[in-house]
Image (cartoon, grey):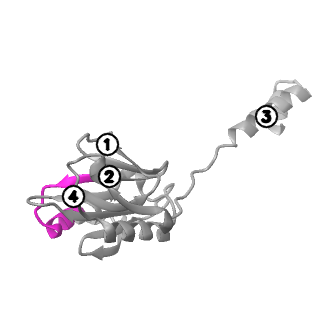
Amino acid sequence: MLAVALVLASCNKTATTDEANADAATTTEATTETPAVAYVFNEADWVETDVSAANKEYPILVKLPKTAKIGPSDVSPEDLTVTINEETGLNVSTAFENTIEEALKRFKAQNTGGTSGSTKMLKEDANGFMYEELATEGFNAQYRFYVIVKAKGEGCYVIHNHATGAVAGTKEAAEKMYETIRSSAKLK
């Protein structure tokens, strides 16, 4: 309202009640956006899920939330996307490496290597790793992970949270999600 009065005063006008109220209503509407909801991990909501029900090329059993939706990836049609909620999701894909160790080495180098100091390794396990993308100006820290499952024959399967699906929540929720997926992922 003060801004309207100042603008009108500079034009030698006075603000009417209707003009001031209209400006206040516009301002109120612009600030009523709902903030993103952080993911809250509840282990009771997670059940063993057969990923091959969505695509037979992925004979994997893994714990996922009961409400998760599995479908083809928009980015790469041969991959799968697991939608956990609006802010959190996973990708399921294949890797050409023949051992879990080789696949982990490549994905670590791609995602945490370099000298920028923008990532911090949080956990390293025999079949996965979790890291933090450190907060930068305008961006909060994000928690990402990769879990590898050895395929029958050649290659491996990869389960990771995708670029737009870094766990939007606390480090604790991200760690619980990683541990649940890492400890439950197996061939069917």
Which residue matches tag 1? 73
- Relative height, residue 88 to residue 185 (above, below): above
Residue span colored magenta? 91-107
Inter-mark Cα distance, 3 to 2 = 43 Å
Label 4 vs label 3, nearer the camera: 4
Q: Quadrant of residue 8?
A: top right
Q: Are the two marked residues, 3 and 2, in contact with CB atoms closer than 8 angstroms?
A: no
Left or right of 57: which side holds 39? right
Which residue matches tag 3? 25
Left or right of 135: which side holds 109? left
Inter-mark Cα distance, 1 to 3 = 41 Å
Left or right of 8: which side holds 69? left
Inter-mark Cα distance, 2 to 1 = 8 Å
Q: Residue at x 10, y 63 (%)?
A: 98
Q: Earlier in the sequence, mark 2 or mark 1?
A: 1
Label 3 vs label 2, nearer the camera: 2
Q: Position of residue 188 (x, y in %)?
A: 23, 61
Left or right of 133: which side holds 44? right
In-front residue for pair 67/126: 67
Q: Are the two marked residues, 2 and 1, in contact with CB atoms closer than 8 angstroms?
A: yes
Q: How many other residues sit within 10 Å of disc 4, few (<14), some (14-19) or many (≥20)?
A: many
